[in-house]
Image (tube, coloured by chain):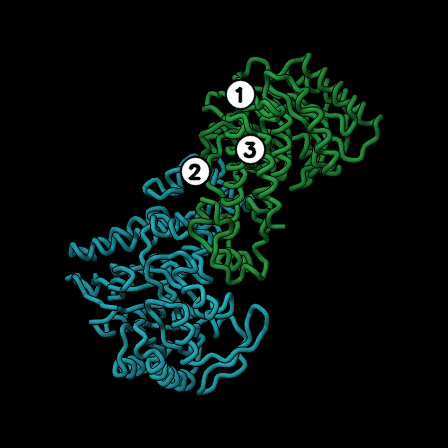
Chain colours: A green, B cyan
């Protein structure tokens, strides 16, 4: 994997860049749709491609439990298994172990947990997390880390940061020579000095990219933005900067402004399934009675398949009837919105006018409220 | 609507024909995918078109309750509402009233029932059933009929047939001059003389097409085939013959052999969602452990999107994880199978070799058993 910064905005930390992988290049800033169990929910790989997705995320935790990473390896790897030709980033399983599974024990070796599917017991270590990601054949792997909840004491966060750093060093050793990129994850909750310490230690180990972890885990939006905006510009300039699990459209805008290159979040796909559609004028709740006989598209300015072909009235009907097509049409629209938003931001940075574009974005977003 | 018989097989009653509607022609024998609530479940109108579907079915009962036929009329009709450009046939609501709703009273005027959705009370009459179908803008409408259960006494079936005939005459009056085609439905359960009587009465009223109703309602497969095979060739030669709600692939083959032109059934779409995939060598249950690491497509002879792009192993994984994409990929395959089967039969009839093709079909179907 190679990364190159292509342009920097004169007014803020925003930048464009290009990640080159064996499976093609990815222009940054980029949003990565989440394909938890080898499927971006309701969407086919061809639709993802048409929507302009260039890289997607797969979840190590889910895939290792079902269908199993060794099975996927025997079937030729995750790309072949799910029919996705572009690059894939896999997380380390850390976030899911701490949010979905029942934790039995955190020790130096790794984490003992019980599967959320069948209660079976597993030990995940930095080495096994990398091993799973090797089996999946990810283009970009993540170090196994401890994802602390919010709130957490300074003492525990400090202990946890040091463990995450030791696990990162072990992850790097485990990944040595495999040809797959490996990113480190900066932890430290809302404590600036712990975040800085973690970053310093990780940078001295040296990774292909750096991520900010444990955001959107219960802290306030202000705290999240504070951590992201302060920390992002401090991540090494020459490597991709990735904020994990964030976020709402305005969070992406703020992240890009602070110099973040990569994002992933379930928000566009999950909200789609819950009937919330993103538009340039703010979210639309498709189940609203106001949509019942509305012949207009979700967003008259949107060129996605859903908006070109279907009315709000029809989408509301599908949603209320729980028709399978509802989830898909909504997902197409929301991913189109997210991926289009990133493209707009890349263009604004390239043209040196990110701050002006940002003002326009907010003015429009609030025009409906 | 116009109908023309184009060729007849020399060895049996099978025939090809063409239905012409304002929204395009339909080659027969044809299978109509079922789009109950203005959506063929999990599939977009564009996919339906790519699969070769030419005409689809909408359910009067469901659509009148949700979102309401008057609402659909205000939104420009069912075609525009759901984005389907080809012809649509709507059933009369009879079958659903008798199978889904709670019947309060059957009287000469019509049927009093309670909605299966919210228990609300409704009266459906021949006139209101036609009125709903006019609002929907169906290219082909069906007469409101009483769909008797199986078993039913001769006495009740006889009474019911005469009511269905009177309702058919009222349906025809209600449809007069609207420019939408109207089909009569032959009832009479498994009683030959009642079926013949009903047919005679309907033919003397005169309809654009004739359907056989109340099949696949609990009678044995043998009884179903007996009624269909005896009755189909007696339906007027010059009008489309339609067997409602039938059936399995072999039922379609037998129906075509007896001279049936039109079919609809939820089997390909419902079975897809339950993980049963049709193949030329018989059904495949995708959840079978044997599929877990099988890199082959569902049917190596199939050219559908699902078979071109995905392995049995991946489809099994999606099915087990209840991923939304599972329902869709399975549905694409099953509809491709059904629509392809009809195309094969049309070609065999045109070439005068239906009986030979039929032997080949069964030999292949049983090669896997």
User: What residue would you read off at disc 2?
Assistant: A50
Question: Are discs 3 and 1 less than 8 Å apart at CB?
Answer: no
Label 3 – label 1 distance at C-alpha: 18 Å
User: What residue would you read off at disc 3?
Assistant: A31
Mark before the other along the chain sequence, 3 or 1: 1
Q: Mark 3 lies on which chain?
A: A
Element marked by disc 1:
strand
Element marked by disc 2:
helix
Check the image and report above or below for B253 versus A21.
Answer: below
Q: Is residue A306 left or right of residue B51?
A: right
Q: Which mark is residue A7?
A: 1
Residues behind callouts 2 and 1 on a single chain:
yes
Is the residue marked by circle 3 packed among few (<14), some (14-19), or many (20+) residues within 10 Å? many
Question: Are discs 2 and 1 less than 8 Å apart at CB?
Answer: no
Q: Position of residue A41 (x, y in %)?
A: 53, 43
Element marked by disc 3:
strand
């Amino acid at each position: 994997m190679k990364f190159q910064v292509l342009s920097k905005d004169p007014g803020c930390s925003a930048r464009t860049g290009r990640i080159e992988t064996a499976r093609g290049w990815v222009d940054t800033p980029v949003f990565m749709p989440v394909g938890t169990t080898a499927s971006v929910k309701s969407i086919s790989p061809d639709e993802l491609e048409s929507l302009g997705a260039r890289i997607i995320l797969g979840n190590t935790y889910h895939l290792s439990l079902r269908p199993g990473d060794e099975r996927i390896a025997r079937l030729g790897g995750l790309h072949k298994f799910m029919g996705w030709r572009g690059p894939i980033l896999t997380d380390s399983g850390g976030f899911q172990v701490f949010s979905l599974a029942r934790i039995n024990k955190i020790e130096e070796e790794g984490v003992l947990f019980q599967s959320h599917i069948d209660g079976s017991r597993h030990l995940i270590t930095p080495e096994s997390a990398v091993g799973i990601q090797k089996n999946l054949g990810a283009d970009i792997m993540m170090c196994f880390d401890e994802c602390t909840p919010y709130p957490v004491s300074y003492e525990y966060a400090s202990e946890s940061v040091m463990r995450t750093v030791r696990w990162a060093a072990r992850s790097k050793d485990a990944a040595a020579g495999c040809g797959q990129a490996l990113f480190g994850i900066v932890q430290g909750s809302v404590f600036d000095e712990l975040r800085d310490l973690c970053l310093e230690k990780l940078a001295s180990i040296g990774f292909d990219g750096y991520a900010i972890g444990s955001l959107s885990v219960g802290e306030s939006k202000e705290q999240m933005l504070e951590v992201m905006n302060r920390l992002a510009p401090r991540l090494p300039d020459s490597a991709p900067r990735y904020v994990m699990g964030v976020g709402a459209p305005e969070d992406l805008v703020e992240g890009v402004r602070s110099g973040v290159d990569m994002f992933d979040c379930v928000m566009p796909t999950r909200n789609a399934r819950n009937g919330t559609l993103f538009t340039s004028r703010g979210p639309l709740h498709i189940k609203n009675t106001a949509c019942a006989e509305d012949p207009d598209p979700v967003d008259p300015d949107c060129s996605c398949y859903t908006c070109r072909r279907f009315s709000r009235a029809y989408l509301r009907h599908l949603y209320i009837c729980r028709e399978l097509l509802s989830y898909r049409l909504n997902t197409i629209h929301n991913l189109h919105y997210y991926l289009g938003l990133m493209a707009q931001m890349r263009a604004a940075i390239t043209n040196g006018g990110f701050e002006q574009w940002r003002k326009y974005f907010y003015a429009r977003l609030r025009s409906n409220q």
